[in-house]
Each structure stands twice: as structure tokens, then as C-alpha cells.
Image (cartoon, rainbow, N blue to C red):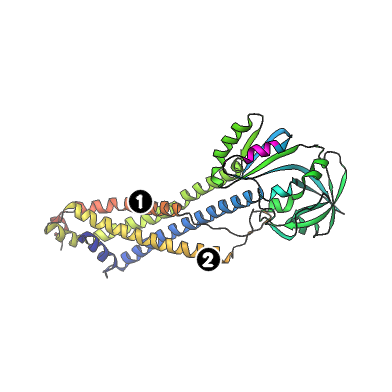
Amino acid sequence: MRYEFWLGWRYLFAKRRERFISLIAALSIGGVALGVAALLIVLAVMSGFDSDIKEKLVGTNAHLIVDTPEGIGESDDVIRRLSSLDHVVGVAPFISGQAILRLPDRAYGVLVRGMDLKREVRVNRLGEYLVVGKLPQNDDEVVIGSELAAFAELKPGSPLSVISPADGKDRPFTVSGIFRSGMYEYDATLIGITLDRAQEMYYLGDRVTGIGIRLDQLERADAVKRVTQGLLGSAFTVRTWMELNQTLFDALKLEKIVMFVILTLIILVASANIVSTLIMMVIEKTRDIGILKAIGSTDASVRALFTWEGLLIGSLGTALGAALAFTIIWALDTYQFVKLPSTIYYLDHLPVRIVWADWWKTIAAALAITLVSTIYPARQAARLTPVDALRYE
């Protein structure tokens, strides 16, 4: 062990005449710990939101959507060509349109999805989200979201009427099942019917609105999109799940960057305490510095001594902050005691997810800020000469 590190450790934890310096050192460690913990917790929450929303979106939607402005005719041929592509595990046609749900005392706007039930289960997880009942088995049945069911006081077997904007006619349905995806927007507005009934409601004939594609790996969406676009030509539009929700994910990414910058300021404030601590320690240890230089220590050694001491403060604060953050994140993930209003947010609880790359970046940033904060006091200590240091001793 280099003696500079050993002396730095001794100076930091040894009993000293000036208790105030010990208090400032403790506050410096606490400040770094608080800043690191706050930053890691916020980044975990932001990553949790990102991950949960991504999972909900791809759970109720396909990874790739193929459509045309006028709809897709002869969809079976297109489906056969798409199914032959590498990494494609499911292909299903769908119809998407607006409608009005007519209740006894009110009307409610809904999003209608016409589904080919045999193929739909290969493209999304709507069937897994069922909490009661089943998916529509015939043209007179409909599956609805849990929030919509609660709002309209509906349950499996309940009758309801849907008005199509294509002709304004009332069409009776029976609720076959209720699903809960965890996203309020879908749970409150989405209703699913059979593909044939949707084609009849919107006068589409044998055409469909689009075709959904599910991949074996979500990350391959962009690569498969390029291959799909080349296969189908410019008459078709191919969009990934990210492109369909680009605004949402751009906002989350920007918020994450902004929070990183803002909360890093807490660590910067703590680094000012480190500067104060080291300056006062240099004053207190002036005699020791003089003796070290008198027996042959170089300027570089003295500078390393106080640099090590500052890094010890930063390292202890960072380690304590990381431990505190991990404990809080574990508690949030295990007990989910922070609830969110699902009518405002996409989720009903505060999600957290540890991204280790964020942790290493935060730890590196904290240590870098600590290192920079040691430059001035360490340089001042190195400038002391033995004569000046020992003159009044």
C-alpha cells in the first residue's frame, strides 16, 4: 500500500483537534451519498417507466404494422409472403376503427379492433390479459377492457350496442370477456370483435386495415422493417412499434437526460464540501506536510496524499449512496407501495428497473466530480515548503 493512501485514510478517520473538520467531512460523505442515491433511484424509475410502457405497448400491439391508405385487399397472399421472412413468428390481419358505444344513459367513444382470432394470439398477448371470460367466439360477441367494464357496469353476458360511423346503425353485441392490459388508454377504450363483423360494420368487403407482425426478438424490428419494405414495395407502409409511439419514447428519453443533469448538481454541491474539508485539513496538517517534505516527500506525493483523501470521501459517499438506492429500489419493486392514479398515468404503481449501465455512468460521474474537487486543495498543499510549514511550530 502506498503511504499516501494510508496517510489519507488515517487523516480522514483519526481523532483530530478540530471536531468541526470531522463534521464537514461527514457532511461531505452524506452529500455525495444523497446525490448518488437520488440520481440512481430516479434513473431506475425512469427506466422502469420505459420498460413497463414498452411491455404494455407490444403486449397489445404487433412489433410491425403493414398498411396502405385504402386498406389491404387479398391479405392472405400478403400474410403468406410475410410469414416466410426470417425472425417472423406471427402474422395477423386486423381492422381498426372508431365507433360509439351506446349506453342506456350516455354515449362513449371507443376504438374497435377486428381480429382474426386464430392468428391474433400469435401477434399480441390480448388473450393472456383476460381476467374473466374469453375472446369473441362469434360475430355477436365482444371483448372489452376492465376500465370500460367498470365505467359502463358491464360483465360477461351483458348486452351492449355499438354505432358504426360508416352508416350510423346500432349493432347489438354480448360481452364475452374482459381484459386488463395495465394501460389505462387501452383498458378504457379498446373493444375487440371478430374480423368478419368489423368488415361488415365498416363496409370493407374482404379488405383489412392492416397486418400485424410479431418477431422472435423485439430489437430486430428495424432490420425486419427494411426487409419487409423491400419485399412489399412502396405501395405499402411498414412501421415499427417505436415509430408508432415515437413521441412518447422521445419524451421519456429527454426526461431521463434532464433528470440526470439536474440531480448531478446535488453531487456538485457535495463536492464543494469536499473542497472545504480538504482546505481545512491542509491548514490543520500544515506541520505534518512540513515534516513530510523535510524528510524527502515530493510535491507529487503530497498532492497524491490529499487527492487520495478526497477520493476516499467521494468513494465512501458513492458506495453508501449506491447501497441506499439499491435498498429503496428493491423495496419499491417488491412491495409496490407507491401507487399511481391509472387515469392519469399509463400504470397503476411506480415501476423501477435497474439498468447497470446507468449505475456505472453515475458512479463514474460522482468519482470524476470528486477527483476534480481535490485538484485545488491538493495543489495548495503541494506548494507548501518545509520552512513555511514549520516556521510557527
Instruction: Determine which residue is flagged by label 2.
Output: 331
Vertical comparison of 221 with 181: above or below: above
- In front: 223, or 38? 223
Q: Residues within 10 Å of mark 2 (few under 14, many from 20)?
A: few
Regarding residue 132, the answer to whether it shows in the image is yes
Regarding residue 284, the answer to whether it shows in the image is no
Q: Residue at x 68, y 51 (%)?
A: 121
Whichever of callouts 2 and 1 sits on the residue coming sooner in the sequence is: 2
Q: Main secondary structure of the magenta part?
A: helix
What x and y, as percent, mark residue 242?
A: 59, 43
- SS type, badge 2: helix
Check the picture and name the quadrant holding the C terminus: bottom left
- In front: 187, or 310? 187
Magenta segment boundaries in residue numbering: 77-86
Q: Amino acid at mark 1?
A: Ala
Q: Is residue 115 left or right of residue 85?
A: right
- SS type, badge 1: helix
Q: Amino acid at mark 2?
A: Ala
60 falls in the magenta region: no
Q: Residue at x 32, y 66 (%)?
A: 22
Q: Residues within 10 Å of mark 1 (few under 14, many from 20)?
A: few
Specify the label residue 205 is tagged with.
Answer: none
Vertical comparison of 41 with 196: above or below: below
Instruction: Determine which residue is flagged by label 1.
Output: 368
Vertical comparison of 119 with 182: above or below: above
Q: Quadrant of residue 198?
A: top right
Q: Quadrant of residue 276?
A: bottom left
What x and y, as percent, mark residue 299?
A: 18, 52
- In front: 196, or 129? 196
What x and y, as percent, mark residue 81?
A: 64, 37
Q: Residue at x 36, y 51 (%)?
A: 369
What x and y, as percent, mark residue 36?
A: 43, 57
